[in-house]
Amino acid sequence: MKPPASRSAEPFIPPARNPLDRRVHAALARATASVSPIALLLATVDWAGHLALSPGKRIELANLGLEQARRLLRYAQEQAFAPPGSAAHECIEPPAQDRRFKAPEWHTWPFNLMHQSFLLTQEWWDAATRGVAGVSRHHEQVASFTARQLLDMFSPGNFLPTNPVLLRQTLASGGTNLMRGAIHAVEDVERAISGAPPSGAEDFVVGRDVAVTPGKVVFRNRLIELIQYAPATPAVHPEPVLIVPAWIMKYYILDLSPHNSLIRYLVAQGHTVFCISWKNPGVDERALDMDDYLQLGFFAALDAINAIVPGQKVHATGYCLGGTLLAIAAAAMDRDGDARLGSMTLFTAQTDFTEPGELALFIDESEVSLLEAQMEETGFLTAGQMAGAFQILRSNDLLWSRIVGEYLMGERAPMNDLMAWNADATRMPARMHSQYLRRLFLNDDLSEGRYPVGGKPVSLSDIDLPVFCVATLTDHVAPWRSVYKLHYLVPTEITFVLTSGGHNAGIVSEPGHPRRSFRLLTRPAGENYVPPEDWLQRAPLHEGSWWTAWSAWLKARSAPPTTPPALGAPDRGYAVLGDAPGLYVHEK
């Protein structure tokens, strides 16, 4: 168990800023897409300076370069004298997740030499930016990431003359693929300027095609709407389920199309389901902070549920940042003797932020300060800023492959419900986002026992609820080993699930979805800590969706089904305000 480092709980006070400095920093943020040039400069100087003082490392890199040149020359000679159609023996294999050079055309001359040279260059720069003595871990990660991004920009797959697949298609179609790509580019620019959703999103209208599970809005304040879903079975388990989604996303990722809606699935399993729908904040909400999201969000929803379904404990479920908020709330409730929760489920939610993955590349004092200056002028973090950060993190999959596919190949990727939801982004209030970045990412106050609720710090070690925790194998936002750290923060029983897929697709994993699997293992309360690599060896692999395992887990902690509760409770101040999905989800 990781003990709290401190019991001090200072209220959050945004850093004071000179008005002139704020304007200059905000202008700089606009010009650099909110990337701090000073942060990049510091990382570069740290890396380059220590590399200059490391002759041994430079000799290693020189030797690596010579060895790579020999490998490439030998490869070129073998290819030059190999009989036609013979199997290629690469001098370097691409990483398993790199699909850029899978096509057979890349194994013909001269494109085989091009892509092998590119992969060797990547290998050299990876070695050059890692393992330099004296470089801070953060600066090493920034230098390595920056080198990788610059190299990816100049991949031979990104250009017509050096991409054999693209050349073949262009010759076969007489260049019509380039014409289609130009039309796609013009259309996308027009949509971006007008603020319209991407092409194809019109087929996934909220309330018509997605977010269609029947229900009613039973509570609304200036931050949330609470949706209560209509029962789909004659009897339901008496304990309701409350879902707390992240406000960085719209809630209906958990209620997409009927076939892959987690909410619809829960209702069909005999649960009374409530879900928070967060308001999309604007300038008027700039002063909202994490305490408001806790009080006006989670606790307001819990009070409403207690009035509508009185006398029953609540199975609380949090997704991503909503899961972090739920963990904070659960710790505060157990600290104060509030026993209204029956269990806690977390989806891809971090509670320890010391190793938050590649997202930490954009989070240091310089970056946060620059972002705060910009948010002080706008009042919020824009949806585009957040989407841009995620695109950079996965530039091969989300940026360059899309540019090549849509603008050079002329092929539009078909829109689906998850892609349409992803384009329906939200903003973040300035004060809340500053507090979130500083309290959690920079200071790690939650896992260190310094995060305050009600003027007193909370400790996750106070949580006394059974926990079902889901992480995803290829998550770039909340890496599974970071999510796993809950094991040494919370002493109670934890059922930990590691499922295939990423941050979103791994959660939207309905039964019957092809190529889905998960590992599951329960750590009883009070047992010793098991390191993540050992857990990976011990946890059995299951084919299919983890939804069924969670459903069984909830049912084991619920009473036998009984008559469903009414929708809303007008006599207690919670009258039905309208049909699901409500009003806030439509705000742009």
Image (cartoon, rainbow, N blue to C red):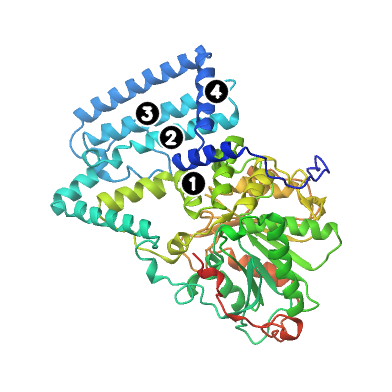
- Mark 2 and mark 1: Cα distance apart in space: 15 Å
In this view of the protein, can residue 14 be seen by the observer? yes
Q: Establish if 160 lies above or below 124.
A: below
- Mark 3 and mark 1: Cα distance apart in space: 25 Å
Q: Residue at x 61, y 59 (%)?
A: 285
First in residue order: circle 3 vs circle 1: 3
At which x and y percent is residue 557?
74, 70
- Mark 4 and mark 2: Cα distance apart in space: 17 Å
Q: Amino acid at mark 3?
A: Thr
Q: Amino acid at mark 1?
A: Ala
Circle on res. 46:
4
Q: Which residue is mark 2?
A: 148
Q: Which residue is mark 3?
A: 121
Q: Amino acid at mark 4?
A: Asp
Q: Which residue is mark 1?
A: 389
- Mark 2 and mark 3: Cα distance apart in space: 10 Å
- Please identify the residue farthest to the left as the structure is shown: 174
Under circle 1, the secondary element is helix
- Mark 1 and mark 4: Cα distance apart in space: 23 Å
